[in-house]
Image (spheres, rainbow, N blue to C red):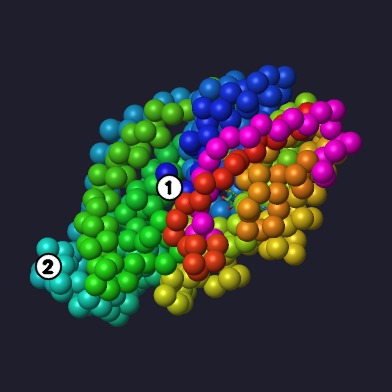
Amino acid sequence: MKYMGHKGKLLPVLGEILKCESVNARRVADPFCGSGAVSWFLAQSTSKAIFSSDLQSFAAARAAAVVERTIVLDADSIIRTWFQAARKVVNSIVVHFPNSSRSIQPDLTIATRIRSLVVRSRKFCHSVLPSLLDNLGGEFPMTIAYGGHYFSPMQALELDALRQTVPSSIAESNACIAALVEAASRCAASPGHTAQPFQPTDTAARFIVEAWDRDVWDLTAQALRSVACAHAQTKGKALVGDYQDCIRNLEPGDLVFADPPYSDVHYSRFYHVLETLARGFEVTVTGVGRYPPLSERPGSSFSRKGEAHSAARALVDGCATQQVSLVLTFPSEGASNGLTTADFVRLGTGKFASIEVYEVSSTFSTLGGSAASRGGRKACIESIACFRV
Ligand SMILES: C[S@@+](CC[C@H](N)C(=O)[O-])C[C@H]1O[C@@H](n2cnc3c(N)ncnc32)[C@H](O)[C@@H]1O
């Protein structure tokens, strides 16, 4: 899954380091689990119980889908039942719009008319659909908040219908939500992440056409098939919460893998769409980005310049006090929250038996940077620092 700070590409090196550093640990924590890539890797390739957490519930749901399950799921059977229930919800809405090519499922073949098509789609989702959806019951957050913006009206309805009808078994529900989050992230008509949707300008129109044309069912099925066959060797746990709570549950000798934010912009600014989907409840949104109110968007002390240093101290001290080793990934320098790897090393010096830093070439997203640098990826040196008790 596309995610800011995703460590998937680093796993060939990072994974080996984590396996080696966790040899004597009973548990490994991934308290900033994000896309879940590292939690999934650890759960599948080690026999340790993995404890994952994140401030955002979609991230915890991604991790839970694999770390909490020790058996393979039958993806085809889940898809059959799940999609049937979701299609029923979609059909119960579509049936009210016989001329649905003008509203629910706009004709995307004429890109020159994209502006009026987008305006019409937004109006349809804001003004026409809500009263019908109210009568149907159930929650339709994607349609009400994001239909005609990040998603076509039909895509938004499909996402809502799928979210409403996830299976009731915890293991299946976790896998389905994880798959749905991935599908939504791949469909969203948004540059890079989901901070703002594309607008129907001459240059961006084709991106909207391309995104709105993506098939929610296919992408969800594809994602579910890959989640379903991944599972942990030992059952772990994934929770929504602060990294400090996750670390507090460890015992001496365990290992923490910490991949804290390096950006001075909160993750919730980029991923509110996925968060709304995972929560499954309607939200009031405002602005071009269709943001939920700040009070409903988790904020991180690592992304507040004035607090980042004390957050780093609390992380390093928390591990030392708990007598757990720490493997930290962080850009060697150039992070917009003002921290460097050297800051963490300074904070840990004298509190651990040894500290060793490896450096690897990487890139990081500049979406959280200044307007001039927004939208690209910047080459950087990423440090993997091992603090051993
Ligand atoms: C660099 S990303 C992690 C990326 C992840 N390792 C991956 O491979 O996808 C940092 C994550 O930390 C989370 N986060 C920020 N502050 C946090 C806190 N105080 N406690 C827990 N999670 C936090 C963010 O929501 C974000 O998902």
Q: Which residue is mark 1?
A: 2
Residue 66 seen in the current view: yes
Which residue shows up at 28% across the image and 67% down it?
204
Q: Is residue 226 left or right of residue 58?
A: left
Which residue shows up at 45% across the image and 77% down it?
287
Secondary element at image label 2: loop
Q: CB under 8 Å between callouts 2 and 1?
A: no
Q: Is residue 89 left or right of residue 246?
A: left
Secondary element at image label 1: loop
- Disc 1: CA contacts within 10 A as few (<14), some (14-19) or many (>=20): few
Residue 212 seen in the current view: no
Identified by mark 2, the residue type is: Ile
Specify which label sits upstream in the sequence, 2 or 1: 1
Identified by mark 1, the residue type is: Lys
- The magenta span reads 346-368
Quarter where residue 190 is shown: bottom left
Q: Which residue is mark 2?
A: 110
Pinpoint residue 128: horizontal percent, then vertical percent.
Answer: 26, 78
Quadrant location of the C terminus in the rendered image? top right
Q: Nearer the viewer, residue 126 or 370?
A: 370
Which residue shows up at 47% across the image and 51% down it?
377
- Disc 2: CA contacts within 10 A as few (<14), some (14-19) or many (>=20): few
Q: Nearer the viewer, residue 80 or 152?
A: 152
Q: How many marks?
A: 2
